[in-house]
Amino acid sequence: MTQRQEINRVVILGLVDIALTLLSLYLASWARYLIPWGPQLTWRFVALPWPVYLMAAAIWPVVLSLTAAYGTRRPTHNRLSAELRSLLLGVGLALLALAGALYFSYRQVPRRQFFYFGIIDFSLLALARLLAHLRRRNGHTPRMLIAGAGRIGEEIGRHVQRQDDDWHLVGFLDDDPAKRDGQVAGAPVLGTLDSLEEAIKSQGVEEVIFALPLRAHERLMHLVLNLEKLPVEVSVIPDYFDLAFFRTQTDDFFGLPLIRLRASAIGGNARIAKRLLDLAITVPLLIICLPLLPLVALIIRLDSPGPALFKQKRVGENCRPLTAWKLRTMMQGADDLLPQVMQETPDGQIIHKRPDDPRTTRVGRFLRRFSLDELPQLWNVLKGEMSLVGPRPELPWLVEQYEGWQRKRFAVPPGITGWWQISGRSDRPMHLHVEDDLYYIHNYSIWLDLRILWRTIGVVISGKGAY
């Protein structure tokens, strides 16, 4: 949909959410009265004071906006499913915020009534999104034309086709004779760039996206200026993707558009949510583990000479160096013995970890089996250098051997656990399976982080692939 339609949709949906949330508060009072459960025998209708309604009306739109519950123009195979997941997270966080506000103001609100409110609110808000989704599918679909059928234009076309309830791609325009009268991403090539105005009028196009190569800069200026007399929205996607580290970000730099080629793949509200999840889990874990670490350190020192803590230079987000902390699991001078344990695959790749590593101590084998040696990295997470979930921070000498595409794994904060760890750990060396990290980056969501954390528990208990 066009930008104007998207803004109208979000505003209307936000107002509907507020109205349905206030209605849910009222219905929760009746639900508690009509559907009693528990040991209490006497039930009565509890009318909530008007400030409670006012707090809910203020909290809900803010929290739902932060959790992307109003959707985006991001391509997805199932937009409704993505919106419902964001809505579930948003309603949950909004309920926690309202519960905190009630704790300091109106503690007399019955707990069962609050529980009913949460169920009714999510159900009504989910129903509203379902109806909006059906309306989008059955209503008018804006028509789009892509000027440029090269690599970038084809990628845009595929994304648009995947999100067919938001756009109808009428086709492409391109000067390449080999593509003329053919198809790209399932849509026809309607003609050359010279026929742009004619194609817009004949096809009823409402938005034009230019995806031309950098060498066509002057041609682009001429085409855009000619479109000022037509009622269409015009967007440009410059062909700089071969220069980009993973994704790009546009900022305002003294009034000028600034394109960041090495922006983090996780930004905005998603980055904030990831950081809050890290802190919510890391702080309690540190409190629990701190009293145990001195005992573990003593056992390590008694088993073999050397310090209990081991620090190592690693490569983190955006290739920035960091100092990762671990409990020592190897004998002193292990780095000097590294050439003895390194192996080379038939295609020239180096494997530096193996299950029979002679440098590992007796206590170290136990710590590695249950990943207890990683516990000090919670400090790295607390400092913000790492996250609980993400690609593992890599050794600098291995990074030096990376190909260009492999460095894309540094587009997000490194993690203690990740998709690679729950898919085989050391049985699948991480520098030989960068595609696992890229899968995580491409499919990132707070739900994927929670899924990985949950599966990590089972992997750690089984000890599979840990050495």
Image (cartoon, helix red, strand yellow):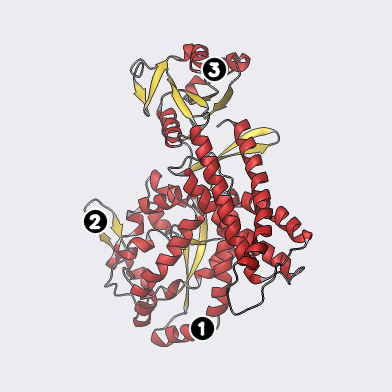
Secondary structure type for disc 2: loop
Task: Give the camera-side residue of 205 and 51.
Answer: 51
Closer to the camera: disc 2 or disc 1?
A: 1
Q: Which mark is residue 218?
A: 3
What's the residue type where badge 2 is placed?
A: Thr
Q: Are marks 2 and 1 in contact (CB under 8 Å)?
A: no
At label 1, counting other C-alpha atoms closer than 10 Å, the crowd grade (few under 14, some 14-19, many 20 or more) is: few
Which residue matches tag 1?
292
Secondary structure, mark 1, is loop
Q: CA distance from mark 3 to mark 1?
A: 66 Å
Percent from the top left, x then y, of residue 431? 35, 56
Can residue 15 be spotted in the picture? yes
First in residue order: circle 2 vs circle 1: 1
Query: How far, Cα to Cα, is label 2 from label 3?
Result: 50 Å
Residue 173 at x, y = what percent? 44, 19
Amino acid on which the number 3 mark rests in the picture = Glu
